[in-house]
DNA sequence: TTCCGACAGTGGGGTCGCAAT
DNA sequence: ATTGCGACCCCACTATCGGAA
């Protein structure tokens, strides 16, 4: 199969908004693929390379050679080229990598170059990724979609599920189960503004409320002496968390899979800021990053994924000592729930996760069974500049620069945000900020600091990037405030007092 | 007919290691 | 020694489609 066929498919997928039509287009490309190139085709249709890291990014793909006039590259040929490039990563030979890139891209047409660049940077943007590919795989292999999805979650890979579906059909898919030592996509939580709303969504069902720790999500597999620790994206970080490995080995069982959070604590048991856990997790030394578990997926040849939450928690409590579990309360009473939230926040944690005790462990899903609740802070800030958007925001001013007032009438930048804007707001702010424009610098439009915006955020973090030494975490727009002038915006002193 | 779950897209700040300067 | 890039950690939010209610 030619790369050009894949690029044409991707263009057809982009051209329609119908998800069914997208899946149809993906399926017809799958039907054309030879058996020996199927894995590459599945990966590429889903917008991902088969290599975890290539050392290439947007910068490494500027200054490309002139494109070829006619398409000639085969799909497998492209995969082999990226294999070679990936092998160079880590050897330190930039010149070799550059030569390989020039060779590959020099054989690609202009369309193919652009598409390959998107593939490398993860910006294929065809309105279809894993989920649509799974749909196409199910259609072509003539197996139920639910079987493909389930296998993909349990194998931690759509590619593995696709291979099973094509090789052995529904039987092969069904044979993919939870395997100790093979990471599973973690279950995720949806969110609610407060515990009252979360409990309401549970419709009176019995719930467990867990403390939400602000660390690194970990999945820990142990098979006798073998321990594997992976992150939310299933990266292996076993070597960086020796304390977690030790604790896993100390638990009274031979084989298990645990879900939890790794977190750096101070001597007195207070959680350290996320930045410190992150730093300590990226290297060794400098304090103990301990695990705090909240779920168990497998214990000594017993799969627990399909057991209800209350059953899994009973197993967890029997396996893991309390000092390595997250704080938890089981209740259906709002006042008890609110008290637990207050206590958890007072202990320095990020928030809570409300969990329906009846639901199974839905690997890879952001289900309604788990709902996170975190407190939100707000500030009235002034827009200092705006950036032109890309993709569906092309032609709109999108990403806004935020500043707090300082003592001598100036402003201190605290970060940027593009979140929380409706299309209507994007249209309005494009017009508004062009009216306030003072100068341009690349894709940045500087404006007179007159527009006040109410910003929600999760907290403040230490910053070396911004002049005030602090930055907003997860900033998003709530609304523009036309009832306030810039002189009434919050000050950097107010911000520092919050930190 | 309306509602809502799941997806994809659009980017944010911070951390590290590594190579080029 | 400093800087820029790539790869991952943590993410929130809106628009949209299509099946569920």
Image (spheres, coloured by chain):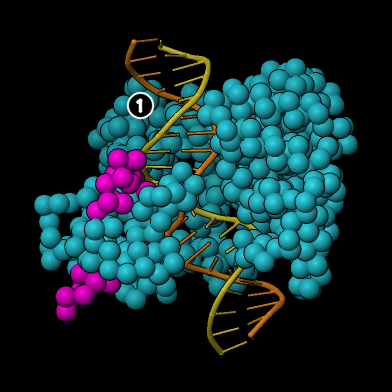
Chain colours: A cyan, B orange, C yellow
Residue situated furthest front in the rendering = A69
At 75% across and 17% down in the image, what residue appears? Answer: A142
Determine the chain carrying the residue at label 1.
A
Q: Give the vertical position of A425 relative to A267 (above or below).
A: above
- Res. A485 image quadrant: bottom left
Magenta-highlighted residues:
A403-432
Badge count: 1
Q: Is residue A53 left or right of residue A280?
A: right
Q: Is residue A431 magenta?
A: yes
Q: Give the vertical position of A486 relative to A82 (above or below).
A: below
Out of A443 and A343, give the one closest to the viewer.
Answer: A443
Out of A387 and A342, give the one closest to the viewer.
Answer: A387
Q: Percent x, y for residue A19?
A: 56, 26
Q: Percent x, y for residue A128?
A: 59, 35
Q: State which quarter of the image contains the C terminus of chain A.
A: bottom left
At 22% across and 50% down in the image, what residue appears? Answer: A480
Q: Is residue A82 magenta?
A: no
């Amino acid at each position: 199969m030619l790369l050009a066929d894949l690029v044409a498919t991707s263009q057809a997928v982009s051209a329609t908004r119908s998800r069914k039509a997208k899946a149809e287009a993906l399926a017809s490309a799958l039907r054309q693929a030879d058996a020996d190139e199927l894995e590459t085709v599945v990966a590429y249709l889903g917008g991902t390379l088969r290599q975890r890291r290539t050392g290439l990014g947007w910068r490494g793909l500027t200054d490309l050679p002139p494109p070829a006039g006619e398409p000639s590259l085969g799909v497998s040929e492209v995969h082999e080229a990226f294999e070679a490039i990936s092998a160079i990563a880590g050897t330190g030979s930039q010149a070799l990598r550059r030569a390989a890139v020039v060779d590959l891209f020099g054989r690609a047409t202009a369309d193919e170059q652009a598409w390959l660049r998107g593939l490398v940077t993860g910006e294929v943007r065809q309105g279809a990724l894993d989920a649509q590919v799974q749909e196409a795989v199910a259609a072509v292999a003539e197996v139920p979609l639910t079987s493909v999805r389930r296998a993909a979650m349990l194998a931690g890979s759509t590619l593995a599920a696709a291979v099973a579906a094509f090789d052995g059909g529904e039987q092969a898919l069904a044979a993919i189960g939870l395997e100790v030592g093979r990471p599973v996509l973690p279950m995720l939580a949806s969110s609610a503004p407060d515990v009252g709303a979360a409990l309401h969504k549970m419709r009176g069902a019995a719930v467990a409320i867990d403390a939400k720790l602000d660390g690194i999500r970990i999945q820990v597999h142990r098979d006798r002496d073998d321990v594997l620790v992976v992150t939310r994206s299933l990266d292996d970080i076993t070597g960086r968390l020796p304390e977690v490995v030790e604790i896993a080995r100390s638990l009274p069982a031979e084989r298990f899979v645990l879900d939890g959070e790794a977190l750096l604590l101070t001597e007195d048991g207070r959680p350290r800021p996320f930045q410190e856990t992150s730093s300590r997790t990226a290297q060794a030394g400098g304090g103990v990053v301990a695990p705090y578990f909240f779920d168990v997926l497998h214990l000594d040849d017993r799969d627990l994924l399909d057991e209800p939450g209350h059953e899994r928690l009973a197993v967890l409590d029997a396996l893991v000592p309390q000092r390595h579990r997250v704080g938890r309360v089981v209740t259906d009473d709002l006042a008890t729930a609110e008290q637990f939230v207050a206590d958890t926040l007072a202990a320095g944690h990020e928030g809570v996760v409300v969990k329906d005790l009846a639901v199974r462990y839905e690997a890879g899903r952001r289900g309604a069974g788990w709902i996170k609740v975190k407190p939100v802070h707000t500030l009235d800030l002034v827009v200092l500049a705006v950036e032109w958007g890309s993709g569906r925001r092309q032609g709109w001013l999108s990403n806004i620069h935020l500043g707090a007032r300082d003592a001598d009438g100036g402003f201190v930048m605290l970060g940027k945000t593009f979140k929380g804007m409706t299309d209507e707001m994007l249209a309005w702010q494009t017009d508004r900020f062009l009216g306030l424009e003072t100068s341009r610098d690349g894709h940045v439009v500087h404006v007179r600091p007159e527009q006040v915006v109410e910003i929600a955020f999760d907290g403040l973090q230490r910053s070396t990037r911004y002049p005030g030494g602090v930055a907003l975490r997860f900033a998003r727009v709530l609304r523009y405030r036309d009832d306030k002038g810039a002189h009434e915006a919050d000050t950097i002193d107010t911000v520092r007092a919050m930190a």
